[in-house]
Image (cartoon, grey):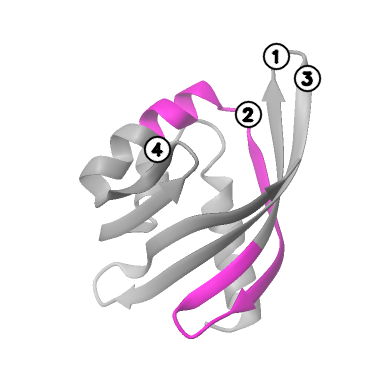
Amino acid sequence: MEREEILDFSRKWLRVWRGDRPGDLIEFYSDDALYIDPANKEGLRGRDQILPYFKKLLAANPSWKWEPIEVFPTDLGFIAKWNATIPVGAEVIRNTEWTSSRWREERSRGTKCTSIVRIFSKH
């Protein structure tokens, strides 16, 4: 994927992190995807493990807003820098994160994430 394709894809992907739509979000992940975040340091493997987590996570955070700032293509996917706006009660946390993502093209399902790992977060 080229930089502009990655940015476009990232915008679509990040859009479904908002509004409690776990069914839409899981469609971006391959059947054997690995998902690692601070709450799942050992990782969740496959859509069957990831979807229940997304359901809880998105239900608890329906007003999140994620926006890509920069993307850096790699041989297997990309490194991305995101801005996050996270409402927590009366406060709003603004955060910048870096993630490493691997993607592959699946013949019948299009481009799918095979792994994502948060590598840096700055509040």
Q: Amino acid at mark 4?
A: Pro
Precedes in sequence: disc 4 or disc 2: 4
- Please state which of the two labelled residues, at mark 1 or mark 4, is closer to the viewer: 1
Question: Which segment did they paint magenta?
Answer: 54-80
Q: Secondary structure at mark 4?
A: helix
Residue assigned mark 2: 63
Mark 2 and mark 4 in contact (Cβ < 8 Å)? no
* Residue underneath mark 3: 91
Q: Residues within 10 Å of mark 3 (few under 14, many from 20)?
A: few
Few, some or many residues within 10 Å of mark 1 (<14, 14–19, 20+): few
Q: Secondary structure at mark 2?
A: loop
Dot 4 corresponds to which residue? 22
Q: Are marks 3 and 1 in contact (CB under 8 Å)?
A: yes
Which residue is the site of mark 1?
89
**Could you tell me how far apart the alpha carbons at marks 3 and 1 are, in whole angstroms?**
5 Å
Residues tagged 2 and 1 counted as in contact (Cβ below 8 A): no
The residue at the far top in this view is 90
Q: What is the distance, in whole Å, between disc 2 and disc 3 at their CAs?
A: 12 Å
Looking at the rendered structure, the kind of residue marked 3 is Glu
Q: Residue at x 63, y 29 (%)?
A: 63
Q: Position of residue 53 (x, y in %)?
A: 35, 34
Q: Give the number of the mark in front: 4 or 3.
A: 3
Instruction: Determine crowd level at label 2: few under 14, some 14-19, many 20+ residues with C-alpha closer than 10 A.
Output: some
Task: Pick the residue in front: 33 or 109.
Answer: 33
Determine contact: label 2, label 3, CB under 8 Å: no
**SS for dot 1:** loop
Residue at 31% x, 43% y is 50
